Amino acid sequence: MADSTTTTISATTMYVHKVVINILVGVCFLSFPSGTAISWQHRNMILDNFCGNCIFALVSSTSSSSSKSILSTSKSTSTLSHQSCRRRRNIHFRHRVLFGSNNHNTEKSDNNDHPIIIDGKKTAAAIRKELEEEIKNIRNEYDGTIPGLAVVLVGERVDSATYVRMKKKAAAEIGIHSVDVTLNTNISEDELIREVEKLNSDPKVHGILVQLPLPDHINEAKVLKSIKYEKDADGFDATNIGNMWLRGGEPPLAIPCTPAGCIELLQRYNIKISGKECVVLGRSNIVGMPMSALLQSCNGTVTVCHSRTENIPEFVRRADILIAAIGKAEFVKGDWLKPGVVIVDVGINDKPDPTKKRGYRLVGDVDYDEAILKASAITPVPGGVGPMTIAMLMKNTVNLCRHSLGLSRLRLRDRLHDGEYVNTTTSTTTTTAFTL
Amino acid sequence: MADSTTTTISATTMYVHKVVINILVGVCFLSFPSGTAISWQHRNMILDNFCGNCIFALVSSTSSSSSKSILSTSKSTSTLSHQSCRRRRNIHFRHRVLFGSNNHNTEKSDNNDHPIIIDGKKTAAAIRKELEEEIKNIRNEYDGTIPGLAVVLVGERVDSATYVRMKKKAAAEIGIHSVDVTLNTNISEDELIREVEKLNSDPKVHGILVQLPLPDHINEAKVLKSIKYEKDADGFDATNIGNMWLRGGEPPLAIPCTPAGCIELLQRYNIKISGKECVVLGRSNIVGMPMSALLQSCNGTVTVCHSRTENIPEFVRRADILIAAIGKAEFVKGDWLKPGVVIVDVGINDKPDPTKKRGYRLVGDVDYDEAILKASAITPVPGGVGPMTIAMLMKNTVNLCRHSLGLSRLRLRDRLHDGEYVNTTTSTTTTTAFTL
């Protein structure tokens, strides 16, 4: 009950805020020199990128120049400052919501006022740095052994080619040996499998990744199955998945990259998972399903929602930790959220945005502007989970190399500290094997 | 809110009912001939086994004989009628609760007044009958091939020996070829593994089961791992578990018996899983974890609670379907339950009971007497999930035999009918493979 009241108020406040900004922008237009045309597109861009205070400041400092020059300056020279401005707008906005009504005081205390913006770029860079150290250690201690990653690309899809390039770049930066196998789109399934088998028996290759999707005439499952378990860089092999779920048995050799990245983010931001109610939106093989296994292994109480779940908002409302991986732009609304929730937004969706050159911008599965008013910590899109995936692919490659040398996997988590991250990446000695 | 009121009332009513029965029994004692001693133990037995009406009837019909003779007669000749009497007591009791207060009318409509008692014995018998047919078909169509199950027993534990005997008996009854390997408790790990490997290469053996627990000097995980994936009758192999979790891939060859049995019970009683909120208590490798995979594959929205879950009753209150596999006698109380809940009680626990010869009786993880007032369907203990486990072991053996012949697995569920059971066991032709 209390929750729905909160919801109504913040939605109304938000509406009032939008109206106020509109009026403000209208006033600004009047103060511009006559004859200056300002389109709706530009108005929207101002609304999207600046807080009320900034608009005032900008207008007063440049009231003699045209609106176009304001926009072009800000566009070209200070994209980052726009972002931070936008973030400030959110915080500023939140302040107004929080302090404008007593009803929100509980909300304020619940989410520490300023939500933590979980920085995936910075965290991924830190992990890559640790891996670089680890790769040097392996090289020194094991006769110049270098972890090797083979990436198989079939056809000429632009997005696939971009991903592959990013992966190769990340590998090169930290000293992983890259093997590229670029194949014609007409290659037969058997030929492709033969290529994978060659890599299976190449001692310089420790991890193999076949870039998906494959052309229609090829059975993806069959090709993926042909990758040797010990070289499965994605961690999607059935035995890996089984070992990830089984408690107390043999640990998996690799863990699916995106969910592993989410756990790293939570741990490195000291977010406790144990005993928390975790809600995972989506049950895909690559995110939702392994995510629920990892959260459960960290002692979270996990609920998985999916396309057949009735009343998803009700489930989301219960979440202390929400993992959104449902692939729908801004699907989760602010009024679905429990104050203080930790949000990990795995979604990367295009949202039409005429202010952008390419006509769209990237948004997550969660409405960020609304969520930031409720969350105690949140991953932005882009810059949240995204950069972690490639870092974790590198970690899997290093781990598979360690396995080939008889070393245990670099742990994803420390069971003893249960949520706290303990850096074990610089040691190459075999440590007690934790399941994950 | 409504729920907690309901709860309080039923608890109070229950208490009043107990007091009334106590007074009733007290009155009965007065009507017994003087000099007849009746102990508290006997009083408890009366309370446990008879409803108020029955006590009246018994007392009036035998008021001239001693209480001891009543008890001895009932003990020796009508154990079954005691049980049905007890069930009647519950229903009778429920009627009073339901009709005694208007507050319970919603409860009444929610759980159809009389809860369905899910009969595991009858269902297991039906499955065994279907398997018997299937085994005959395989024999006729595939040159006299007989599904074979090898059971390895190490040492002389009485409980293990009993289980093994039950499994062999069930196998023999439906025409499965049994291979017994009984080994000395001092056998070394290597020798045991060699025995398993012999069975791995025996073409007459399709399923292998090593009875657990093994003696302390043997590494159980290592021995279980030595069982060939294609002969893993328990379905605990990592690849099997992985394939069970992965959607749309290769189906598992065998499914852990107890959770598979639970799904069979739900399906054969036409209980819809899709879209329902399912709460699983326990995350063990043998029940909780595979159970959550199976429920999710049937499109349930699944939450897994475990030792680190805070406030388990709150989770239980949300359940449309509750699977209790936490191993604590009568852990789940009646006032934790949502009216109309479907309960599958996997627990088998000893509860001290001085009225029993052996000093205890078997109870589940759910307080049956309380739960029956809220549930729309419930499995009793014993006679619920228990008998299903061995039936599903037989089904796994038949399925492994089918696999060796290039046939697909008899489906656990029909994805199309989603919750409705469709009998496919009598056909030996290869059908479209469903994941589960």
Image (spheres, coloured by chain):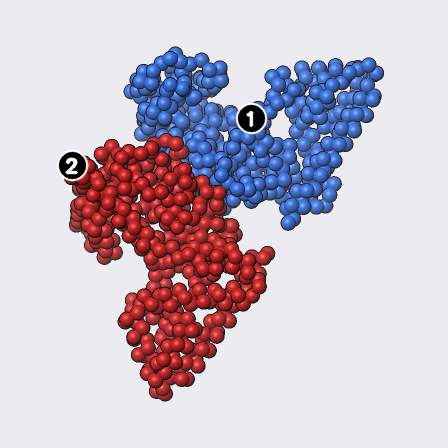
Chain colours: A red, B blue
Question: Which residue, given by chain and number where applicable, does mark 2 sit on?
Answer: A143
Residue B342 visible in image? yes
Q: Chain of mark 2?
A: A
Neighbour tally class for label 1: few under 14, some 14-19, many 20 plus, Cα within 10 Å: some
- Where in the figure is residue A161, as x and y percent of width and height? 22, 54
From the viewer's perspective, is the residue at label 1 or at label 2 nearer?
2
Q: Is residue A53 left or right of residue B364?
A: left
- Where in the figure is residue A296, as x and y percent of width and height? 43, 41
Which amino acid, by three-letter code, is at mark 1? Answer: Asn
Q: Nearer the viewer, residue A180 or A344?
A: A344
SS for dot 2:
loop
Whether callout 1 and callout 2 share a subunit is answered no
- Residue at 40% x, 84% y: name it: A31
Image quadrant holding the C terminus of chain B, namely top left
Residue A74 sits in which quadrant? bottom left
- Residue at 32% x, 36% y: name it: A252
Q: Are the residues flagged by discs 1 and 2 in contact, CB closer than 8 Å? A: no
Which amino acid, by three-letter code, is at mark 2? Answer: Asp
